[in-house]
Image: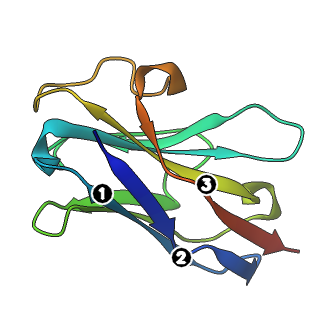
Amino acid sequence: QAHLVESGGGLVQAGGSLRLTCAASVRTFTNYYMGWFRQAPGKEREFVAAIGWSGGLTDYADSVKGRFTISRDNAKNTVYLQMNSLKPEDTAVYYCAAENTSGRRLYNPTLFQVYDYWGQGTQVTVSS
């Protein structure tokens, strides 16, 4: 079982930055592949970024490459999403997701269906 809590969302002007944090209450955090997804009003949930247990494997949506960085601190059971150069189209509720892979690579980390655990979400609003 995993309990995920996101924080760090808010209102920011275009071009600004935010850092989202996801705190995971799990027994062995390094067993979990972690991801960030987002959902804007009237749109489907979409993949943003994912990271393997050591931080050596990362994936990004094309729309955020070069602007967002996913990282994790295994000592703190925490995953981060640093968002720079934010655009109005980044406005959405951002969700943290986790999947227990026993430390192995997660194939298809861009699919929300492969994750069993989700946080409640945090709102990010980017004004133009």
Q: CA distance from mark 3 to mark 2?
A: 10 Å
Report x, y in % for residue 90.
Answer: 72, 57
Of the residues shown, which amino acid type is indicated by label 1? Ala
Residue 37 image-quadrant placement: top right
Say which amino acid is labelled 3: Tyr
Which residue is rendered at x = 69% and y = 55% of the image? 93
Give the Cα distance between marks 1 and 3.
15 Å
Measured as percent of width and height from the top left, residue 10 is found at 68, 78
Farthest-out residue, front: 1
Quarter occupied by the N terminus: top left
Foreground of the two, 117 or 93: 117
Residue plotted at (61% across, 73% down): 9
Residue carrying label 2 = 8
Residue in view at x 30 percent, y 57 percent: 24
Location of residue 125 by image quarter: bottom right
Q: Which residue is mark 1?
A: 24
Asked whether the viewer can see residue 54, the reply is no
- Residue under label 3, please give it: 94
Q: Which residue corresponds to the image point at 17% horizontal and 69% vertical from the top-left?
A: 76
Q: Is residue 24 visible?
A: yes
